[in-house]
Amino acid sequence: MKNLECVMDDMGKATLDTILTEIRKLSKKIDNIEQLLTELITSILPEEEISEEEAKELKNALKDVQAGNYVTLEDLEDA
């Protein structure tokens, strides 16, 4: 439990500051992994030409997702 030991103080209690620091470190690592995966996937996928209409559809779909207007696979499976 090496990672847990690093957030313990002298009395063996985890402090809020040390826990938050560890969470921020993990968040940064996850962000870096996500960025690396995005770059990797982007570099190996072939480029595809799309029409203006398809580009508009993609932009509208992205706006819908950002607004929370979507259905998950789990929702569909439960229906």
Image: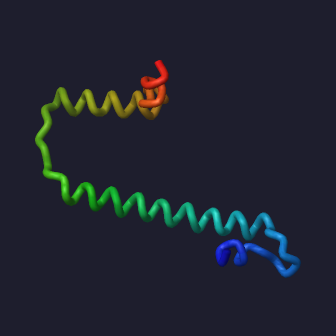
Asked if 25 appears above or below 43 in the picture, the reply is below
Relative to 3, 11 lies left or right: right
Q: Quadrant of the N terminus?
A: bottom right
Q: Residue at x 43, y 23 (%)?
A: 76
Relative to 43, 74 lies left or right: right
Q: Residue at x 79, y 69 (%)?
A: 14
Residue 74 screen position, x and y as percent: 47, 30
Quarter of the view holding residue 37: bottom left
Asked if 11 appears above or below 69 in the picture, the reply is below
Extreme residue toward the top, this view? 79
Asked if 14 appears above or below 48 in the picture, the reply is below
Q: Residue at x 57, y 65 (%)?
A: 26
Report the front residue among 78 and 17. 78
Report the front residue among 69 and 14. 14
Relative to 56, 34 lies left or right: right
Residue 32 screen position, x and y as percent: 44, 64
Extreme residue toward the right, this view? 11
